[in-house]
Amino acid sequence: MSDEMDIAEPLRLARERIDGACRKVGRDPAEVEIVGVTKTHGPDVVRDAWEAGIRIFGENRVQEAAWKIPACVSGPEWHLIGHLQRNKVRHALELFSVIHSVDSLRLLDQIERVADESGHRPEILLEVNVSGEASKDGLAPEQVPEVVEYALGCRNVTLTGLMTMAPFAADAEQARPFFGRLRCLRDEWERAFGIGLPRLSMGMSNDYVVAVEEGATWVRLGTVLFGHRPKWRPQAEERWEP
Ligand SMILES: *Cc1c(COP(=O)(O)O)cnc(C)c1O
């Protein structure tokens, strides 16, 4: 069961906290957009969130998005925020206009090749593992310059920024150094390559206020907007193979 009010109020609160964080550090709140993370939720939640004013939605699995997105209201911008396997790139480009999670040169190369054939013009972010945690996806900072260099030679893919995930911590303040580090690395690579990397995708339900204070432009919010995720039940429609 879903009711539009269930989303409107948490959305209003999240927006208020984002705007407050912007004021605190002298940023323009218009620079920060919410990506509603609807993984495991159905098309009804997407519809309610769309009606409440969310315009960008994030999914982390191509198979799940493949049945869900066609069943959703049209209008939203769909972003892939989870790890992408190279054999799913073709399908991902049909579903998503932005990929936050480009984490290897081989994946970038595959996206560029497939986009060249299919005529898609994806926007991408490079996922950077700033914490160095072995369990996290993402490029090590020292691997990034080579990938940026490659992206600059791509004709179909446009690199617009960086994404990271902070290690989970009960206290959001513990995430601050990682977000600050991503912003500093961004500034460094903008100077080194003479390019703009305006997008910073960082901050989730537990740490988005700190992320905004540190420069996030896309915050990826699931639980804080939609409540706890239902346990994942594979759907018949989901049995999709590339
Ligand atoms: C699930 C997910 C989110 C949202 O997480 P919440 O804590 O529910 O806000 C954000 N980013 C990524 C990459 C995710 O997989």
Image (cartoon, rainbow, N blue to C red):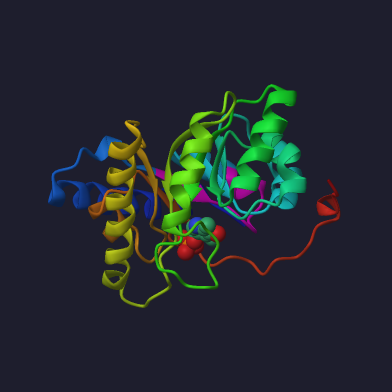
Viewer-proximal residue, 36 or 80?
Answer: 80
Query: In the displayed structure, does residue 155 sit left or right of residue 214?
Result: right
- Vertical side of 128 occupied by 28: above or below: above
Q: Pick out the residue farthest to the bottom.
A: 170
Viewer-proximal residue, 40 or 212?
Answer: 212
Which residues lie in the magenta part? 34-46
Where, by quadrant of the figure, is residue 93 drawn?
A: top right
- Vertical side of 128 occupied by 44: above or below: above
Residue 186 screen position, x and y as percent:
33, 46
Asked if one can make out residue 16 in the rendered structure from this viewpoint, the answer is: yes
Query: In the displayed structure, does residue 232 sit left or right of residue 3?
Result: right
Residue 152 screen position, x and y as percent:
48, 31
Residue 17 screen position, x and y as percent:
26, 54
Residue 33 screen position, x and y as percent:
37, 41
Q: Looking at the image, which residue is at 51% across and 44% down?
A: 147
- Vertical side of 67 occupied by 154: above or below: above
Image quarter where the C terminus lies is: top right
